[in-house]
Image: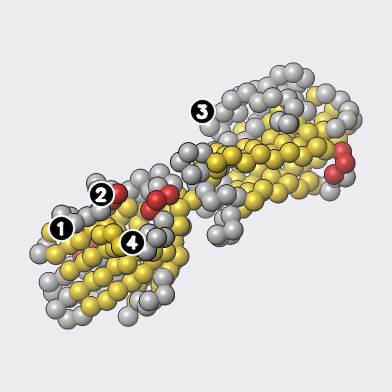
């Protein structure tokens, strides 16, 4: 009596058929697979339900008589769900949920019935955003992430460890109308000087251990910053991109992490 391969995108895990739900994380605006397997049987009936935080149960997807039955499907899920029909006869009741949004969060129940058996499985779906942008400016190091969910924790560290009095740190968090968060943090050198240091900006979520790290090797020479290498390290299954560029006094170069990258003020926001 097992459910195998519950997964988020390409991340796989295992759960047991029981009333205790399995936790699955899906990235916003992507497709997510809630995977359930069952013992092969005849006359398969599959029902997927969503229990929103308010306790309301909504039909997500139904399948019986060898075809989809979507008359009672909730409006929120229309044209965004499907089953792997070619695999149902092999015991696959997995649900594909497209274009994931924050409102998809909650508890999902999968009921599977055959002439030989009936089963129920439960999955808690969590939605997350991911970092999109990292920037560097003339006398300050910025760590910026747009479209994050839930609200992340941001921490700075340096190698070698630096006296905190040398830098002015300011962090700003804004929530968008869609419910996601934009985070920007700035480490600005307070005085002129020659400093060679590696900065690490770490974004983490309370929900899981996924983190996003921005590592920058910086040489401060009076009012000039020479950035040798910057790597934005995103959570699992997100391609890492490495790029380098040179910034001098009063000049800002456009970063290549995102096409939306914009010029950044040389000073931390007040």
Which numbered disc, 2 or 4, marks the residue that appears first in the sequence?
Answer: 4
**Quadrant that contains the N terminus:** bottom left
Q: Depth check: give the residue in front, 105 or 224.
A: 105
Q: Check disc 1 and report its element: helix, strand or loop.
A: loop
Give percent across and percent down for residue 103.
39, 51
Q: Which residue is mark 1?
A: 69
99 left or right of 136 in image = left
Q: Depth check: give the residue in front, 261 or 55.
A: 55
Give percent across and percent down for residue 250.
74, 18
Q: Check disc 2 and report its element: helix, strand or loop.
A: helix
**Front tag of 2 and 3:** 2
Evaluate if marks 4 and 1 touch, with contact meaning CB atoms under 8 Å apart. Answer: no
Q: Is residue 83 visible?
A: no
Q: CA distance from mark 2 to mark 4?
A: 14 Å
Q: Which residue is mark 2?
A: 75
194 left or right of 62 in image = right
Rendered image: mark on residue 259: 3
Q: Quadrant of residue 165?
A: top right
Q: CA distance from mark 2 to mark 3?
A: 34 Å
**Front tag of 2 and 1:** 2
29 left or right of 75 in image = right
Relative vertical location of residue 29 with respect to residue 121 in this rendering, above or below: above
Which numbered disc, 2 or 1, marks the residue that appears first in the sequence?
Answer: 1
Q: CA distance from mark 3 to mark 1?
A: 42 Å
**Front tag of 3 and 1:** 1
Colour scheme of the rendered structure:
secondary structure
Q: Which residue is mark 4?
A: 56
Relative vertical location of residue 132 with respect to residue 236 in this rendering, above or below: above
């Amino acid at each position: 009596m097992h459910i195998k391969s519950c997964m988020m995108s390409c991340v796989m895990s295992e759960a047991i058929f029981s009333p205790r739900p399995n936790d699955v994380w899906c990235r916003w605006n992507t497709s997510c697979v809630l995977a359930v397997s069952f013992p092969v049987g005849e006359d398969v009936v599959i029902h997927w339900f969503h229990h929103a935080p308010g306790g309301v149960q909504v039909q997500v997807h139904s399948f019986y008589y060898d075809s989809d039955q979507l008359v009672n499907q909730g409006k929120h899920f229309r044209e965004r769900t499907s089953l792997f029909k070619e695999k149902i006869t092999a015991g696959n009741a997995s649900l594909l949920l497209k274009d994931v949004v924050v409102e998809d969060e909650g508890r999902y129940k999968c009921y599977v019935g055959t002439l030989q058996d009936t089963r129920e499985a439960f999955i808690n779906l969590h939605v997350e955003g991911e970092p999109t942008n990292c920037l560097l400016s003339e006398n300050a190091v910025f760590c910026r992430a747009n479209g994050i969910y839930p609200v992340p924790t941001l921490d700075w560290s340096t190698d070698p460890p630096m006296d905190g009095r040398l830098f002015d740190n300011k962090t700003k968090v804004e929530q968008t109308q869609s419910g996601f968060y934009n985070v920007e943090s700035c480490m600005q050198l307070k005085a002129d000087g020659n400093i060679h240091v590696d900065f690490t900006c770490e974004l983490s979520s309370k929900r899981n251990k996924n983190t996003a790290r921005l590592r920058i090797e910086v040489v401060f020479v009076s009012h000039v910053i020479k950035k040798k290498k910057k790597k934005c390290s995103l959570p699992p299954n997100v391609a890492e991109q490495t790029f380098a560029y040179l910034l001098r006094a009063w000049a800002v170069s456009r970063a290549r992490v995102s096409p939306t990258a914009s010029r950044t003020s040389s000073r931390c926001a007040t």
